[in-house]
Image (cartoon, rainbow, N blue to C red):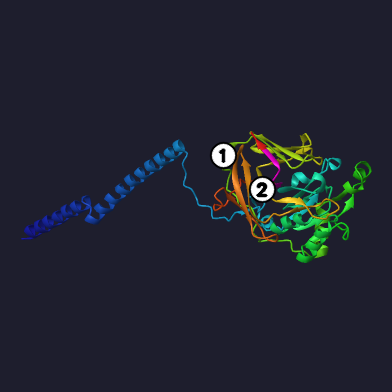
């Protein structure tokens, strides 16, 4: 009996050992799933690495990268259309009357101007009205001459502080009536001084000068506003945009028997180089020839002021008129509109409805007599 009992116990123990061994060799279902997941993850990791390597290779081959949109605001010089800082974009410009007779050349500082107007004065001569945005950094600039009332119209159109040395009776009447912010060398000497070399060699009337430092000092003393959000007459393309027009690699604008301005197109730099009196128009501060991205010729009625014993002129730059616009070696017809003498003005395409867009850069404007001779080739 004892032998049978021991045999049964031995059989049960042996069976238990066999079951335990079987269970240890066969993992549970959860263990199987985890093993499968680990293998899948390893496989997926390898595929991701391969895809990433392939993408990097494609990027290197094509040079393509994801573009990040730049939402940084941009600011532009209102006189040139060129990108600049916010501070410079809000500066109120200064406009200076510059002598342009033969005895007074070469001038100084005028190559720093963003815009230059040329208009007839008495006796067939012209004067320049130079507009500066960054006037505070101007080197010695001049020589500065007296005002005529129609130059004040241009200053008002640009919301500019007007700088001059004297003026005609009608100019003083206009300055007083409009309360134009101006600095006059006759009554306010802070911004002005005489260049002794010019005074000795050219004459006293051709020696009045200024600098950026003196202009800033004068404006502060006057308490004039130095920022401007006023509309300027010019609108610009965002970048250089050549147009279909007639070829114009040379332009000749004959104001009178005495004054003729000529422009030669520099195709390498895409600007027009100005000459007058048969030679390059030079700024003696840096010996640079004046250059412009845009040339604008605007026709308007001009003539002798009745009864004026000095032969002074009237220039009726208001209403509407025709003109030409040249840039990048081509020229086309345009029109202009100016509601009144005190208003700004707008330039249009020939249709008189589409606003003209200038190319970014410096601009020369001739307020040209209707009888003036203009040619180009």
Q: Which residues are magenta?
A: 367-374
Question: Residue 203 appears at what percent x and percent y?
Answer: 92, 45
**From this viewpoint, which residue is outermost toward the front?**
307
Q: Nearer the viewer, residue 295 or 17?
A: 295
Residue furthest to the left in view is 1
Q: CA distance from mark 2 to mark 1?
A: 17 Å
Name the residue at 11% across, 55% down. 11
Circle 1 crowding by C-alpha within 10 Å: few under 14, some 14–19, many from 20: some
- Of helix, strand and loop, which one carries label 2? strand
- Secondary element at image label 1: loop
Residue 197 in the image: state x and y as whole percent. Answer: 92, 43
Return the residue at label 2.
Answer: 298
Quick check: is 129 in the magenta stretch? no
- Residue 370 belongs to magenta span: yes
Q: Report whether 2 appears left or right of 114.
A: left
Q: Position of residue 244 (x, y in %)?
A: 54, 39
What label does residue 245 carry, if any? Answer: 1
62 or 355, nearer to the observer: 355
Q: Nearer the viewer, mark 2 or mark 1?
A: 2
């Amino acid at each position: 009996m004892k032998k049978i009992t021991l045999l049964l116990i031995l059989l049960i123990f042996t069976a238990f050992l066999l079951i335990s061994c079987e269970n240890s060799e066969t993992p549970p279902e959860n263990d199987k799933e985890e093993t499968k997941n680990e293998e899948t993850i390893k496989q997926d990791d390898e595929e991701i690495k391969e895809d990433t390597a392939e993408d990097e290779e494609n990027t290197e081959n094509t040079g393509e990268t994801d573009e990040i949109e730049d939402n940084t605001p941009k600011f532009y010089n209102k006189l040139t259309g060129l990108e600049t800082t916010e501070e410079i974009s809000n500066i109120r410009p200064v406009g200076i009357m510059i002598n342009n007779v033969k005895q007074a050349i070469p001038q100084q500082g005028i190559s720093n101007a963003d815009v230059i107007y040329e208009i007839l004065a008495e006796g067939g001569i012209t004067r320049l009205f130079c507009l500066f945005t960054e006037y505070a950094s101007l080197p010695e600039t001049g020589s500065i001459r007296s005002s005529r009332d129609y130059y004040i119209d241009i200053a008002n159109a640009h919301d500019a502080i007007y700088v001059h040395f004297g003026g005609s009776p009608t100019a003083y009447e206009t300055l007083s009536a409009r309360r134009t912010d101006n600095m006059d060398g006759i009554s306010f000497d802070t911004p002005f001084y005489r260049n002794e070399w010019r005074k000795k060699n050219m004459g006293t009337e051709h020696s009045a000068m200024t600098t950026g430092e003196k202009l800033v000092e004068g404006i502060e003393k006057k308490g004039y506003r130095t920022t401007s959000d006023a509309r300027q007459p010019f609108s610009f393309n965002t970048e250089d945009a050549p147009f279909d027009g007639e070829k114009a690699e040379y332009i000749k604008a004959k104001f009178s028997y005495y004054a003729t301005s000529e422009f030669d197109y520099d195709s390498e730099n895409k600007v027009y180089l100005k000459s007058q009196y048969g030679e390059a128009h030079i700024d003696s501060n840096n010996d640079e020839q004046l250059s412009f991205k845009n040339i604008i010729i605007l026709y308007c009625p001009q003539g002798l002021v009745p009864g004026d014993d000095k032969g002074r002129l009237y220039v009726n730059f208001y209403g509407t008129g025709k003109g030409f616009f040249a840039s990048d070696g081509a020229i086309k017809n345009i029109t202009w509109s100016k509601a009144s003498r005190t208003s700004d003005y707008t330039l249009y395409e020939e249709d008189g409805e589409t606003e003209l867009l200038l190319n970014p850069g410096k601009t020369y404007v001739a307020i040209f007599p209707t009888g003036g001779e203009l040619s180009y080739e």
